[in-house]
């Protein structure tokens, strides 16, 4: 019997194959994958065969099914693949690390055209989540490809603490009073992109939804981020008021992640509550906030309150808001609405980051 499982290193996905015999498993081989691909293996017939199904996809490769033998999994025969929906020729994936405020190495993927000019001129979108032990791994996205990469822009996915990319400890490193570690990690990736010359603050945008909306809300409100690092922010179905989150919809179930604001936990929660950290004197980058009237997980009141406060502070010209009346926490009820919401976000980013006269 062959058993396979995956381990993620800083650079590659590693698949390990073990054989069960005489009451014990023994490691037979390790197979390192390619940067930017997420392969997985399963047995064709666990009882009678050592053949394996290998399924893989990545930023530039649609989901592909292949057949391999456990004895030589690197010699897989591709059988079928989903169709490609954007022109990925010349698009490459690289992985780098950025040093966070406490020295932790934070990995991120950079997807861009070959020969990217390192002069800070490339519109770049930085995406993150950083919570609930959810891992962000390479995957194929026709929307990102067609709306962003085909235009010669760069896309970045940050594996910040709070996620599950490197096991429970990576998640636990950003729980409750340590939540700021996730935001410091995200800022570190932004600074690394700027210092490498990939982009510049006027050309760098960030995007996140749900807990990722809390992340991007903090990128707006934190004095170490804001216009210092970003030229545009997309904040989707966000969590933004950490004083009352536990009283709205499913919020009480997240106190293990964030803390209980009715206790002394408020002393640290208020430091990463975007709604409570806005001020009139600060010049904020343009922000697009989107939500759904029927979101049954994160109350739309979070988004409404932040936008209302920005307007009260005189930030109307740089504040954009869209509330879909359907769709739940996904923000859209069908493919037509999903396409509209995606187009809305990418149009906003295109206008704010890629305009000829912006930042030049």
Image (cartoon, helix red, strand yellow):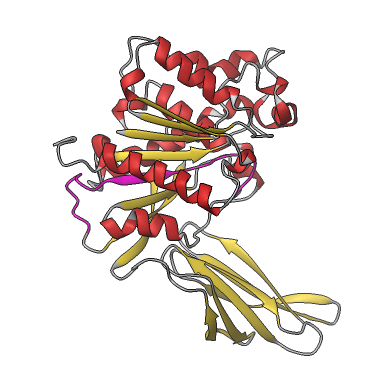
Task: Specify the quadrant of the image occupied by residue 224.
Answer: top left
Verify whether residue 133 appears in magenta: yes
Q: Main secondary structure of the magenta part?
A: loop
Report if residue 276 lies within the magenta region.
no
Q: Is residue 44 left or right of 107 when viewed as pictured? A: right
Q: Quadrant of residue 11?
A: bottom left
Quarter of the figure with the N terminus: bottom right
Q: Nearer the viewer, residue 28 or 230?
A: 230
> Going by the picture, which residue comes out furthest to the bottom?
48
The answer, for residue 169, to whether it is visible in the render is yes
Q: Is residue 35 above or below residue 220?
A: below
The residue depicted at 69 percent of the width and 34 percent of the height is 296
Residue 342 place in picture, x, y as percent: 45, 47
Q: Residue at x 25, y 64 (%)?
A: 114
Q: Position of residue 66 (x, y in %)?
A: 57, 82
Q: Position of residue 180 (x, y in %)?
A: 52, 28
Q: Residue at 53% of width from left, 30% of height from top?
A: 214
Residue drawn at point x = 78 percent, y = 82 percent: 46
Left or right? Give the position of 124 relative to 184.
left
Residues in magenta, as a range? 116-134
Instruction: Please say whether residue 103 is visible from this viewpoint.
Output: no
Residue 355 drawn at (x, y percent): 21, 41
Q: Nearer the viewer, residue 99 or 63?
A: 63
């Amino acid at each position: 019997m062959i058993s396979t499982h995956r381990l993620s290193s800083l650079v590659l996905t590693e698949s390990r194959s073990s054989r069960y015999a005489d009451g014990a498993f023994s490691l037979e081989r390790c197979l390192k994958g390619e940067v930017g691909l997420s392969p997985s293996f399963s047995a064709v017939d666990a009882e009678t065969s050592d053949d394996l199904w290998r399924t893989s996809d990545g930023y530039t490769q649609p989901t592909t099914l292949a057949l391999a033998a456990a004895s030589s999994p690197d010699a897989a025969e591709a059988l079928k693949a989903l169709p490609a929906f954007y022109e990925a020729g010349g698009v490459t994936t690289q992985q780098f690390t950025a040093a966070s405020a406490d020295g932790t190495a934070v990995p991120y993927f950079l997807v861009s055209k070959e020969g990217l000019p390192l002069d800070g001129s490339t519109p770049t979108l930085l995406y993150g989540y950083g919570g609930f032990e959810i891992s962000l791994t390479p995957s194929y996205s026709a929307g990102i490809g067609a709306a962003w990469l085909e235009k010669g822009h760069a896309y970045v996915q940050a594996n910040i603490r709070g996620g599950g990319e490197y096991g429970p400890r990576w998640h636990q490193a950003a729980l409750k009073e340590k939540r700021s570690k996730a935001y410091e990690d995200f800022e570190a990736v932004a600074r690394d992109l700027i210092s490498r010359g990939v982009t510049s603050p006027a050309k760098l945008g960030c995007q996140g939804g749900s807990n990722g909306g809390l992340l991007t809300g903090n990128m707006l409100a934190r004095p170490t981020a804001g216009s210092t690092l970003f030229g545009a922010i997309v904040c989707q179905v966000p969590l933004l008021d950490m004083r009352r989150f536990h009283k709205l919809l499913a919020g009480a179930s997240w106190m293990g992640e964030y803390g209980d604001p009715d206790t002394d936990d408020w002393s640290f929660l208020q430091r990463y509550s975007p709604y409570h950290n806005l001020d009139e004197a600060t010049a904020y980058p343009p922000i697009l906030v989107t939500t759904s009237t029927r979101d049954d997980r994160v109350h739309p009141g979070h988004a409404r309150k932040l936008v209302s406060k920005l307007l009260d502070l005189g930030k109307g010209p740089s504040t954009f808001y869209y509330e879909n009346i359907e769709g739940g926490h996904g923000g859209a009820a069908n493919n037509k609405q999903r396409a509209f919401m995606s187009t809305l976000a990418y149009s906003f980013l295109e206008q704010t980051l890629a305009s000829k006269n912006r930042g030049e």
